[in-house]
Image (cartoon, rainbow, N blue to C red):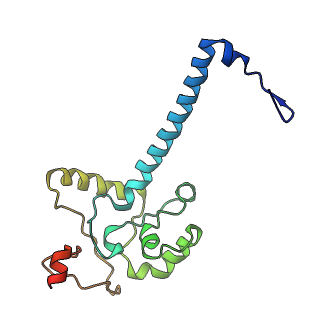
Amino acid sequence: MRIGQIAIDVSPLRESRDFRRLFAGQFISMAGNAVATTAANWQVYGLTQHAGLGENVLDHRLNTRTVKMCFVHRFLYWNMNYHVEHHMFPMVPYHRLPQLHEEIKHDCAPPYPSLWAAWRELVPAILHQLRDQEYFVRRDLLPGAAPFNQPAPANDGRALPLATATAA
């Protein structure tokens, strides 16, 4: 078979069962490598976004993390380490998130200084959540930050169930 000017001999695939097995094994290995690389990337970076923080919180500043990273990590992660900013303004392109962070950092919780700092908080939080599903890390905004809403003391800042919200 000829594709353009490149000649490809596929006869070993047709004639040799061992070659087909080798070819299939290489394909499966490459696919597994791609999955493992993606999974490792998600585990290192992705868990820092929300793990251990409150669910159903209306204010993204309280259930999302911004983590400071070096240029290489920011590039690999497409600046999603500015995750609070991404949730607050989802239409801002990834390359403008650092500038957005500088504009709104006075209204947000302090960013984590490193991946290590985020992981030092989220691992114990996840382990605690295995024993107590109601537990979550409570984040505080900086003094003087603009309020998103004034949470009722009964619900601790989390969204009220629909039935309760309509009855109130």
Give the image quarter of residue 153. Answer: bottom left
Kindly identify the residue that appears in the image at 14 percent across and 55 percent down.
132
Estimate the x, y position of residue 21 in percent, counting from the top left. Answer: 57, 18
Above-or-below relation of 71 to 127: below
Q: In the depicted view, which residue is nearer to us: 131 or 72?
A: 131
Give the image quarter of residue 120. Answer: bottom left
Kindly identify the residue that appears in the image at 19 percent across and 80 percent down.
165
Q: In the depicted view, which residue is nearer to us: 73 or 19?
A: 19
Name the side, left or right, on which 144 lies relative to 44: left
Above-or-below relation of 73 to 8: below
Q: Is residue 156 visible?
A: no
Kindly identify the residue that appears in the image at 37 percent across and 72 percent down.
110
Above-or-below relation of 134 to 23: below
Kindly identify the residue that appears in the image at 57 percent across and 58 percent down.
75
Q: In the depicted view, which residue is nearer to us: 15 or 30?
A: 15
Name the side, left or right, on which 100 lies relative to 153: right
Q: In the depicted view, which residue is nearer to us: 53 or 139?
A: 53
Estimate the x, y position of residue 30 in percent, counting from the top left. Answer: 56, 33
Name the side, left or right, on which 1 lies relative to 74: right
Estimate the x, y position of residue 69 in percent, counting from the top left. Answer: 49, 60
Name the side, left or right, on which 35 lies relative to 63: right
- Number of numbered discs: 0
Estimate the x, y position of residue 168 in percent, counting from the top left. Answer: 15, 85
- Please identify the residue farthest to the right as the structure is shown: 5
Q: Quadrant of the N terminus?
A: top right
Q: Is residue 138 visible?
A: yes
- Please identify the residue farthest to the left as the structure is shown: 154
Above-or-below relation of 102 to 49: below
